Amino acid sequence: MAPFPWYLLTLPYFDLLLVGLSVLMGVLWLLHLRVKNASLADAGFCLGLVWIIAVCGLMGEGHFWRRILVVGMGSVYAFRLGWHVMRNRVWRKVEDPRYEWLRSWLGQWEPVGFLGYFVLQIPGCVFFGALLCWVMAHPQEAVRGWDLLAISIFLLAIAGETVADRQLERFRADSENRGKVLREGLWRYSRHPNYFFEFLHWCAYVPLAVGLSWAGLAPVWPLLMLVFLLWITGVPLAEVQALKTRGKAYRAYQRTTNRLFPWMPRRNS
């Protein structure tokens, strides 16, 4: 049977996946109550994604090499991002200002509100994990040009996101840069190159879907990620915080540099 986009929901072990995700998010929520850092939910999304694709890789359909490829791609992405979150936002770090604001807004409902936030990671893991489980079940055994294109996009995305994150880490580690705006490296061409390469990563799975029934739906995943990054959870919240801490310098940066997609900087008029 040819797989389809909601293939994951039809698998006999889908209940096992949900139980594992529920236990993971429940444990992380309890831990968050102790350390007062809700960024653990972001790390939980990464671990949950690894859980889904690992089970699909072991028990799902598709040629062995293709399952290994997709599990490898998804795991490298998730572990890199999860490690970045733990090292820069959780371990011995002050909670992200976005979560501090949400905590004050929730007031006495804070524990319940954040429980809901952790629980929301479950459908997120299922939705994005479904894409990887779907493409790894592709019945094609031969290596195609589409597969090589997917690998190329993936390597570019992971390398770009890693470089962008490290450039920002080094900039923030220098106390002399407090209140300044990073305008070097990849940050010269985009105000959020890390988010751009995050979007590009999800584009890597679109070529892998070529040849499947409903393959035209594959772009839905990267496009939805783009919507979240540009208008919901990514860029808007990051820029509000940047304007608070960098003020006029960041407004000048906004006038000269593209919000997401890299391009040559404009002159500041």
Image: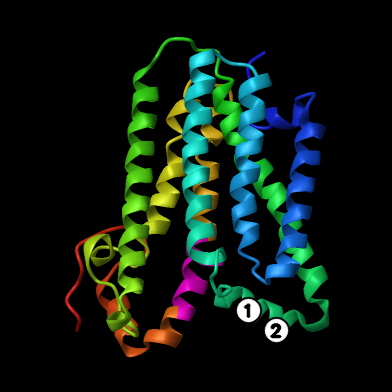
- Residue, disc 2: 104
Dots 2, 1 in contact, CB < 8 A:
yes
Q: Determine the residue positioned at 22% across, 67% down.
A: 184
**Whole-percent x and y of residue 11?**
75, 25
- Residue, disc 1: 100
Q: Secondary structure at mark 1?
A: helix
**Whole-percent x and y of residue 49?**
61, 41
Taking the image as shown, residue 145 lies to the left or right of residue 205, namely left
Residue 133 against residue 160 in the figure, above or below: above
Residue 53 against residue 170 in the figure, above or below: above
Which quarter of the picture shows residue 167?
bottom left
Other-residue count near label 2 (Cα within 10 Å), few / some / many at <14 / 14–19 / ≥20 = few
Q: Amino acid at mark 1?
A: Glu
Quadrant containing the C terminus is bottom left
Q: Which is nearer the eye, 92 or 151?
A: 92
- Start and end of the magenta stretch? 229-241
Q: Secondary structure at mark 2?
A: helix
In the picture, the disc for residue 139 is: none
Q: Determine the residue positioned at 52% across, 58% down.
A: 85
Q: Determine the residue positioned at 34% across, 83% down.
A: 178
Q: Amino acid at mark 2?
A: Ser
Seen as rendered, the residue at the extreme top is 141
Which quarter of the picture shows residue 86?
bottom right
Query: What type of secondary structure mainly makes up the magenta span?
Result: helix
**Whole-percent x and y of residue 59?**
68, 20
Q: Determine the residue positioned at 31% across, 66% down.
A: 170
